[in-house]
Amino acid sequence: MLESFKRLLSGKPAEAAAWSDVADWAARQALNFRRVREGEGFVIEGLLDELPWRLEWGPPQRAYIAGRELRMRMELDLPGDLQMLLMARPLLDLLERQTYESFTEGLQTQIDTGTPEEVRWLVMFPKANLNMHRALRGRLGAVAAAPASVNAWLEGPLAQQLERALGTLLQFDPPFVLMTLRGRLYLRLQLVDPDVASLAAAVGLFETAARQALRCAAQAGEGGQEWPSTGSTAWQSFDDSKPR
């Protein structure tokens, strides 16, 4: 833990040599691990019920994440209008405040397509009421095209996984985003030190969120529910055409 804080203060990522335990863990889990060129990070790929997912760890793609970022994505073929966003409460408050200040100080007159979806959605979509999830509501916030869909997503296994994560992976409220967009599931997390325990926790949380999102989609399909849609670019992958 001390070494992690030292790296955070120095701005230096974990040394590539330290990833051997990550590679070993991935091999034990039948996951595909590879480093990306220039030593910027690594990629892990796996399957959930024959559906592929991808994990990347390396330089952040979002300004609100410092040091290094863990990001995951998975194509679930969800309805395009199933749009839900769950976010660490401190991050949600920060982004709302920054967006408000940009508009009130005249720095911006409208939200453009270059603004990350998670920021745009904080303005566009209503907040979900998390009062039924007492252990989560003080630490997490959510918005959605249909706020009721968030509680359906959280119900049961996902809420339980998040409660556990609040004491481990999300213990100090790092920037954290979990969202469904254009049929896919995305996760972003500030993670300076990609230790095996953190990676395993993130994968477990992500896979639970995927299964629960599929359940929500099935329930919505049975009820014939539709939600409004929006979208732009949520992900820029590593250039790992030359993995090592």
Image (spheres, rainbow, N blue to C red):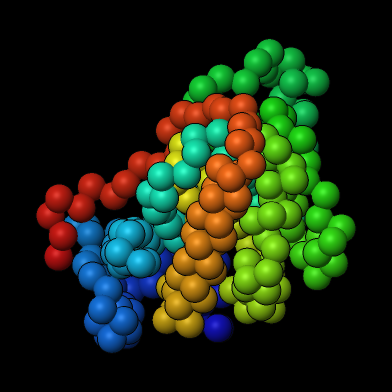
**Residue 204 versus residue 87 in the image, above or below:** below
Residue 1 occupies which quadrant of the picture? Answer: bottom right
Image quadrant assignment for residue 190: bottom right
Side of 240 where 54 appears, left or right: right
- What residue sits 65% from the left and 16% below the top? 110
- Up-down relation of residue 161 to residue 63 (above or below): below
For the point 70% across and 38% down, the residue is: 146
The number of numbered discs placed on residues in the rendered structure image is 0
Which residue shows up at 60% across the image and 50% down it? 219
* 90 left or right, relative to 236: right
Tell me: 103 left or right of 188. right
Q: Say which residue appears at 41% left-offset and 50% top-offset.
A: 76
- Of all residues shown, which one is farthest toward the front? 222
Quadrant location of the C terminus in the rendered image = bottom left
Q: Position of residue 57 (x, y in %)?
A: 38, 61
- x and y percentages locating residue 167 in the rendered image: 69, 78
53 and 141: which one is in front? 53
Q: Is residue 50 above or below residue 112?
A: below
Residue 72 x, y percent position in the rendering = 42, 57
Residue 39 image point, x, y percent: 25, 62
In the displayed structure, 170 sits above or below 20; it is above
